[in-house]
Structure formats: structure tokens, C-alpha cells
Amino acid sequence: MVAGLRYFTDRSDDGAAGAPLLDTVNGEELMHVQPAVSIVLGNHPPESPGTLYISTKQVIWLSDTERTKGYAVDFLSVSLHAVSRDPEAFTSPCIYTQIDTGDEDDESENSDSESNETFDLSKITEMRLVPSDPNQLDALFEVFCECAELNPEPVEEDEPEEHNWIFSADQLGPAMGIIDGVDQEWDSSQTHFTTIGHPNGDHDLARNVLELQINDQRFEDAEEMESNNRNGGQQ
């Protein structure tokens, strides 16, 4: 899928204008056809009336006078659609849409001076569809809503955390060897510690944690021996 608005010229040979060729192999179906619709891209002047095709995947506008002129946008790139009847917002009632270009760093295309043949579609973030019959707006809006529901935003998998802080006892490897090397009489099965993972395969953190636990055990043993010696000396 190409994010944002794009040129569309794939037409069938049927009829003078030619209907758009859809991706029927992957289940795309034509949902609505609305003739006599002008298109307004950004702040550019309206195009001559053409035919609007709404499929289960995309919105396509094809010129009735120039067979090589057409535009399309996938529903996944339409971030907002609404009916606009406010004359202060636009001179004619229309379907107003906002388009996600997929590039947050790019500024939108707002120049009125450039010709329609040269402006950059990848920067167009607003599109208005103006039917010659304003009474068709509500029907168009309903079709937009229905097709938008067929194209929910894909759920992104949770990105892996910067550090994986969980590993098995087998992965402790060298760190477990510290226990055997320092105190053979210490029964590691009697210890109750929480395993902590290491970032990027570094065992140092696990090693340090276990060394602290070993030292804690030694202090406890030393205190116990000192207490026994005192009690023995008093007897």
C-alpha cells in the first residue's frame, strides 16, 4: 500500500471514460459510483467534473474529459471524512477528507501557483469531493463510513523492550558457577531469588546480583559463628 494520494490511470477499455481496474484477485469490490463529481486537492482549484468510484479498498476519481487523469487514495490513508456544508469553509457542499501521507516531517502542499500537472501529490493532506447534486452527500458519506469500517488500522505488534529482563536458570551459566566455586556447602536449592535478565547478552548484572547474595549469606554465617563462640565462651 502506498500512503497518501497517488495518480491513477488503470482503466478498462469499456465505455468512453473507462471504469477503474480493481484488485479483484484480492477481493476488492466496487461499492458505489457517483458521476458529475469535482475534486479539489489541497488549496488548488477544482478539477473539471469526473466520476467518483468507491471500492472496498480505495477512493478513485477519474476525469471524464482526460482519460489519463485520475487520482486514488486507500481508505487506510484517509484519516478523517466528513460532510461539509459550511460556506465559510468551502464555497460548495462537499465530502471533506484528511489524508495521511505517511511522512510527518513533510509540510502539506498549499501552493496555488503551481499547475495541476506539477504539484506533489505526496504532500496533499486535504481532498474535497464536490458532487453536482448536494443531495447525494449523505449517501456518499454513508458509503465512506461503511468502507472505512472494512479497513481498520492494522494493529502494530508490541515493540520489543530495550532490555529483556527474564531468562531461565540455564542461561545463568557462568553466574551459577560462582556459587559452586565460592561455597560448595551452600545449597543453592534453598535460595529464593528473582531471576533478572541481562541486556544484549551481558552476564555482568546477573553475576553481581548473585555475588551480593553470596556475600549476604557469608555475613549471616559469620554472625552465626560469632554468636556460637560467645555462647560457648560463657559456658
Image: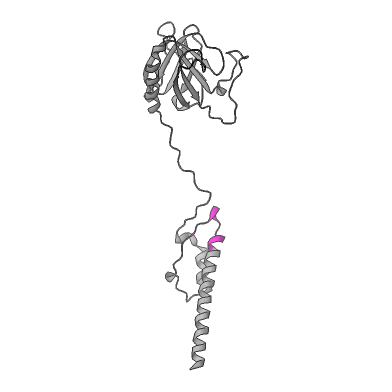
Q: Position of residue 12 (x, y in %)?
A: 42, 12
Decide if residue 121 is in sight here.
yes
Q: Position of residue 93 (x, y in %)?
A: 46, 14
Residue at horizontal 53%, vertical 73%?
182
Q: Is residue 107 magenta?
A: no
Decide if residue 181 is in sight here.
no
Tell me how the rendering is colored.
Answer: one colour
Q: Where is residue 15 in the image (x, y as percent from the top left)?
A: 41, 6
Q: Quadrant of residue 118?
A: top right
Relative to residue 184, is residue 64 depicted above or below? above
Relative to residue 180, is residue 60 depicted above or below? above
Residue at horizontal 55%, vertical 60%?
205
Residue at the far right: name it: 113
Q: Is residue 202 magenta?
A: yes
Residue at horizontal 48%, vertical 22%?
97
Numbered range of the magenta stretch: 194-206
Residue at the far bottom: name it: 235
Choose between 130 and 115: the one closer to the eye.
130
Q: Where is residue 156 in the image (x, y as percent from the top left)?
A: 45, 38
Number of marks:
0
Question: Would residue 120 appear left or right of 96 to someone viewing this image?
Answer: right
